[in-house]
Image (tube, helix red, strand yellow):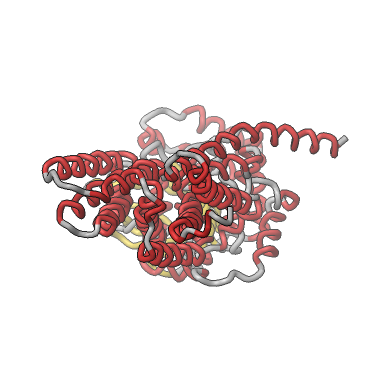
Amino acid sequence: MEPVISSCNLAVRLGSKTVLEDISFNVNPGQMVGIIGPNGAGKTTLLRAILGLVSISAGELTVLGQPVSRINDQRNRIGYMPQRLLFERHFPLSVGDAVATGLLTRFTLLKQIKGIEQKVAEALTLVGMGKYRLTPFQELSGGQQQRILLARSLVRKPELLLLDEPNAGLDFPAQQQFTELLLQLHRQQNLTVVMVSHDLVSVAAIADSLVCIDQRMHLHGSPGEVLRSHELHDAYRCEFDYLSTAFQLEEERK
Amino acid sequence: MSELFSYSFMLRALVAAVLVGLLCSTLSFFVVLKKLSFLGAGISHTALGGIAIGLVCGLNPVLTGSIFAVGAAVSTGYLSRIGKVSEDTIIGVFYAFGMALGIALISTFKGYYPELFSLLFGNILAVSNQDLWLITIVSGVILLTLLLFFKELLAICFDEEMALAGGLPVNLIYMGLLAAIGLAIMISVQLVGVVLVAALIVVPGATGFRLSSNYRGMLMLTLFTGLLGSVGGLLLSYYFPIPPGAAIVLLMTALFILAMITRPILNSRRKDSELSENV
């Protein structure tokens, strides 16, 4: 089975600074993979490298069977949800309009997009927000806005979904609801999901595997392996004993 | 009123007011959404350097000012994207440089520059047929381009990162928008002058943004404010002893203040009607 993402000794330099070095991992079809690491580890840069938004300076990176340099041909097959906290909360769009912006790609330039209404309605139904199509985006709660942004990333029916800190800025119930929705969609749609998060506990609870980076590769394995490893402590430069104990208890309970 | 339009200069001024009102308010929609308001103010003042070069060298000051304005706008966008300096900081530097260059040139080469006062404070009544053609062509090209790329521009204003991920030529479209703002500012200088032109690029959009939670409504209100402000200001200046440029900006600002006051009232009325519907 060909991996959806294959990274081999990947390095990224931004100006004179090496942001990522020697990053190797695979993501198989239908997997949910969490990318974790401390602040400034290069998690978002890795996601941007997968999207072809930053150039790689060494190594190999293939996405959906193609080298990342040819990502432009694959863009319709990739959904992306950037961080919600970077948005203008009062932007004057209705929910339907916000989702429809996800249909715009280099292929739609100067062209009329067909079936917008239907595609938007389907994406909103997927995230349980079908009745909010005409509601102003700015009137929604943080959790609801996050669902709308998820709908926007799904509107092109992608095979690969990339999420950047989807739980950032949400309270605990909203985080829980969003995580449940993500799991449900992952199973129903057989989506391959790559999620960047600094929330170790929530990402470990749902991911099939974790990639831990801190500018360079530290670990790649199942959540249990990663959370129990001393390499995790090295990456974060602190002790996580309570995490490995909690994870062990959880596994024993299962 | 009919007497008003019997003067050919007044007719030309009216057409110029409609065209510039339409152009600047359409750009104002994107300026406010992309938070480029200070860029609008900065470009107009930077253009003073170009205008002064034109005046002291005997070239067309609108042409040299346009080169400066477009150059400053595009350079600001480019430099902010390649470096770690924000657009506000870069335009802050250009703003001061353009003003200083303009003041230095005009005071060093002391001469008689009859156009200077018009370019600083605007003189819509002095718009010639040639100026009108220039305004029509520039407005037409910019408005047509904005129409063609409207949905892409809206998506870039909403979420640039997502637009990049979709493979849209974000940098090219953004630089095009900045160049259009620079050009629009320079052709509007003849109406309201360097000192006041930023208001045409900022106030209509700010008024629409304040009153509407939907981009279609915001665009309509922005166009309404821009057109009412420019045409209404011109008419006001005919009946009252106020220069047209100042009258246009004062009327637009009054509309913005009205929007600030009415928004909470509109909100509370809407909430009341929603409540009564639910009951």
Camera-side residue of A85 and A21: A85
Residue A114 percent location from the top left of the image? 63, 71
Q: Residue at x 53, y 54 (%)?
A: B4
Residue A51 percent location from the top left of the image? 43, 58
Q: Residue at x 47, y 54 (%)?
A: B17
Q: Residue at x 44, y 45 (%)?
A: B244
Indicate left or right for B103 with B43 as reference: left
Above or below for A147 versus A67: above
In the rendered image, is residue B234 in sight?
yes
Image quadrant assignment for residue B242: top left
Mark count: 0
In the rendered image, is residue B87 in sight?
no
Q: Residue at x 35, y 35 (%)?
A: A234
Above or below for A68 versus A187: below
Camera-side residue of A31 and B185: B185
Residue B202 percent location from the top left of the image? 46, 44
Camera-side residue of B265 and B77: B265
Indicate left or right for A192 with A8 as reference: right
Residue A105 percent location from the top left of the image? 50, 65
**Placement of the C terminus of chain B among the 4 image quadrants:** top right
